[in-house]
Amino acid sequence: MLVISRTFLFFSWAIQLAIVAIIVLMILRLIGDAADLNPFGWASRTLRRLTDGFVVPVRGALRQVGVDPKYAPLVVILVAILLGYFILQLVGTLATTLSGVITGVQAGQLFLVLGFILYGLLSIYSLLIFMRIIFSWGMVSYQNPVMRFLVDATEPLLGPLRRMIPPLGRMDISPIVAFLILWLFQAAIQGTLLRGATPVAF
């Protein structure tokens, strides 16, 4: 358990550090753009080299939806925070599931092991659906590999629900129903296979 805890702590610090680094770079980019630095100067070239990989794709996406590209650094900050949150949730779920499986194996309880695996998989699936919702709000194209993975992974559940449940106006409520179904399954697993279990929370 100590190894899992320390590994999770390391990943958490690494992700948080990456988010802070991106935020600092984007703020510097905003300051540089506002200060109208010499585009051929060392500071401007270095700043562009460090940030263009994030800013340029977002600028293109903003142009497609008719938003001023100058807001790209702010959008990058929001995306970095959201992705960091998703990754932290995913790593935390994996760590909790793994610690629960180890506890079940040490206790020799097959039902406990199975319960933690199923509960963890359902938690990850719920997170994937949530990520798909956020990405679709951001109008991320299916051509994007992350969006393609999210759609391919979640459509087996959302597709049939969408066909069975009519939308409310222009709002697709199939993800809400999917969350409810997954939550009910998790509650059932917690009340049967995981009854009395106290997993380590990360």
Image: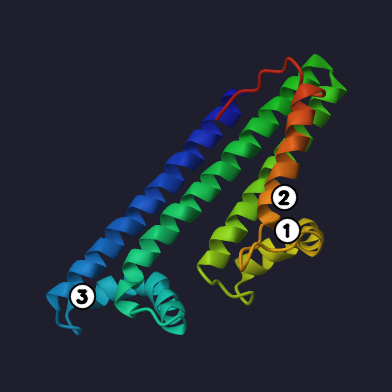
Q: Amino acid at mark 2?
A: Ala
Residues marked 2 and 1 touching at CB (< 8 Å): yes
Q: Which residue position is annotated with label 1?
A: 154
Residue that appears at 29% across and 62% down: 25
Task: Identify whether 119 is placed above or below 53.
Answer: above
Q: Amino acid at mark 1?
A: Thr
Whether residue 81 is visible here, answered yes or no, is: yes
Look at the image and tell me in which quarter the C terminus lies.
top right
125 left or right of 63 in image: right
| Numbered disc 1: secondary structure | helix
Packing grade of label 3 (10 A; few <14, some 14-19, many >=20) is some
- Kindly report the distance in space between the C-alpha atoms of the residues bearing marks 2 and 1: 10 Å
Whether residue 43 is visible here, answered yes or no, is: no
Residue 178: mark = 2
- Please count the marks in the image: 3
Residue that appears at 61% across and 60% down: 132
Front: mark 2 or 1: 2
Q: Residue lying at the far front in this picture: please name it.
A: 169
Residue that appears at 39% across and 78% down: 59
Packing grade of label 1 (10 A; few <14, some 14-19, many >=20) is some
| Numbered disc 3: secondary structure | helix
- Kindly report the distance in space between the C-alpha atoms of the residues bearing marks 2 and 3: 44 Å
Residue that appears at 61% across and 23% down: 200
Task: Identify whether 80 is placed above or below 144.
Answer: above
